[in-house]
Structure formats: structure tokens, C-alpha cells
Amino acid sequence: MSDTASPEVPQSTQRRHEVNQSPIARLERMIEIRLVEDRIQDLFAQGLVSGTTHTSQGQEAVAVGLAAATRATDFVCCTYRGHGHALALGMPPAVVLGEVLGRQIGCMGGVGGSMHLSDPDVGLLPTFAIVGAGTPVAVGAALQFATKKTDGVALSVFGDGATNIGAFHEGLNLAAVWNLPVVFVCENNLYGEYSPLESTTAVTDIADRAASYAMASEIVDGQDVDAVQASIARAVARARSGGGPTLVEAKTYRYVGHSRSDKAPYRKDGELEQWLARDPIELFAGQLLASGELNPDALDAMRHRQLQLIDEAQERVLASPTAAIPRMFENILSPSHS
């Protein structure tokens, strides 16, 4: 993968095409996400990131599987833990890092910060800092697809904690009643912020909640990028063909705490180690090595290339001016026509 795009095609669009087409590109994108989020944590520790950060190391297969199963003309809404989704869908590392560091090179000119990323070229609607807020927005996007009679699909990505929010239930209910082309993707990483799922939720499987709305559902191994892609592709195909919404529950895990200061002391003994043994990057790399699609030297070169590209992206970001504060007030109100 290259950090340089042709002048005719936005770089984000080119990167989105790559992840749609190639298993090797999907592995490299997963590696990129892990390294970018590791770098974000390093930059925060250096005092270069204002505000908080929420990373998703361990959940890369869900973001990349979703990107591979959708089109750039579909709409995706996700949470404040959205760096991985933005990268998976095609946002370049320098643009993600730029927004996190509050620089003008960022996707929102640096005024949105870590929790607010967007790229219309790849269908990424703004990520949301409010838990569960993306669900009704995705339903609205699906409604416009249906009203305009296009074959677009909207996807809402959220954590298990969001399924206890009213907006989640309102969104699913309306999508089911109106048979809208929307896919709800729950990244069930077992914790809503610091609370274990079993302490806040009566059902073990979030997918069971779809039955309340006569909605199709699937449970998928969120550490297996091929399985995620196949599951979301089925749901997207159902939505495109007029079959209505689906709730997909991806069983996954984040190797880091809820936010930058959380050391996750609430984890059960041995739990982290069990999930590290099923690291999605190592699982997929192992499959490609076993099939002969990849060799160890190429894998090492891939990791080295991504580190180099991220170093170069960081240099570009740090050389970029800081956000122009007056821009915070742009695009809030429609232009005056008086």
C-alpha cells in the first residue's frame, strides 16, 4: 500500500478500493490500525494529544471486515472509538493522526479531535461522542436510501454498552417497522466502559435482542476477519434486496482499557491472555502464511513498511499548523440567504 495517491482519485477512495479487493491489503490495513493506535497512545503520553482518546487494539478484524463487505457509497456511523473504522474505510493515517493531534491536516481541520472523524469519500459519517447516538442517524441515512429508491445501505457500529441506551431500541424498532436497509453491528467486547456485560445486561448474546423487533440476527467471531466480512456481507445483501435490517453481533475484545488512563483492573484473571492468544492480526496472518498467499519475509516487510509510513505521517502532522479555532463555528448554521 502506498501513502501516495494519483491526483485524479482521492487517497481515501484509493485505499478503500484496496481493502475491498485484496486479502493481503486487509491484513496490512489491520496492522496499520494497530500501529496507528499504538502511536496515538505514545503521542498522548508525550502530552501531544489534547482531551481523551479511545483506542481499539484487538478489534481490527471487525473494522476491516466491515469495510471489505461494503461499498464506499454506503454510509457508516460509528462511535468515539472510531480510529480503526476510519482507517479501514480509507482515511489516510496522516489525516487520522492530524485530527487526533488537533492539526489542520486532520479530516475536520483539527477542531473535532479524537472522537469526531468523518470522510464522505468513503461513506464515513461523523463519529459520535454520545453513546448510541449513531444508531438513529444510521436509520435516517437508511430512510433516505429507501426514499430515493437507491440500493445504498447504512451501517451503525456500536459497543455492547450502547445496547442499553434508548436510542438503540428506538432505532431498531423504527428500522424494523419501516423495513429499512440498515445493518446494526455490535462490537461486543464484554465491557461497557468499566462495567462487565453480565452486570448490566440480562442476555448473554446481544443478538437475541433482535427477536423483539422480528429482525434477522447473526453472531460472528469478531477476531476472524473473513468471518466478519462474510457475516456483514450477508446482512448488507439482505438490506440491498429489500429484506430489511439485521443485527450482527461480533464477539471481540479490546486489549486496552476504556480510555487512555484506564488500566482495566476489573478484568478477570487470565482473561486478557486468553484473548491475546486469538489476536485477529496473528490469526489472519497465520491463515495467509498457511495458504501460501504470504511468506514470512513479506510479512516482516509489511510491518516495517507500515511503521515507516506512520513515522512519515507523524512528521507531516507535527509540521502541520494547529487547528484554526474560529473554524469551530463553521458549518453549524446554514449560510444566510438574506
Image: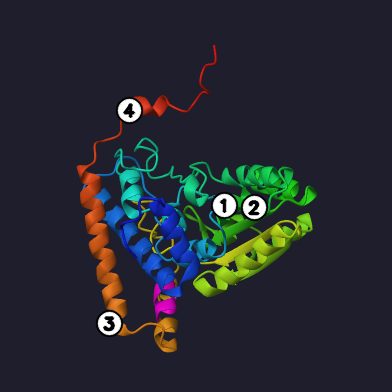
Q: Which residue is mark 2?
A: 152
Q: Residue at x 53, y 49 (%)?
A: 123
Compute the Cα span from label 2 to label 1.
7 Å
Q: Secondary structure at mark 2?
A: loop
Q: CA distance from mark 1 to mark 3?
A: 36 Å
Dot in front, 4 or 3: 3
**Under tag 3, what secondary structure?**
helix
Amino acid on which the number 1 mark rests in the picture: Thr
Q: Are marks 4 and 2 in contact (CB under 8 Å)?
A: no
Q: Which residue is mark 4?
A: 325
The residue identified by callout 1 is 73
Q: Which residues are magenta?
A: 277-285
Give whichever of discs 2 and 1 has the lower sequence position: 1
Q: Are marks 2 and 1 in contact (CB under 8 Å)?
A: yes
**Residue at image location 64% in from the left, 65% down from the top:** 205
Tell me the distance, in whole angstroms, between the alpha carbons under discs 2 and 3.
Answer: 40 Å
Q: Is residue 151 visible in this depiction of the protein?
A: yes
Q: Is residue 271 left or right of residue 98?
A: right
> Horizontal and vertical percent for residue 201?
63, 57
Is residue 325 placed above or below 313 in the rendered structure? above
Q: What's the amino acid at mark 2?
A: Gly
State how far apart marks 4 and 3 are (Cα).
Answer: 46 Å
Q: Secondary structure at mark 1?
A: loop
Amino acid on which disc 4 is placed: Ile
Q: Residue furthest front?
A: 8
Q: What residue do we see at 26% from left, 35% from top? A: 322
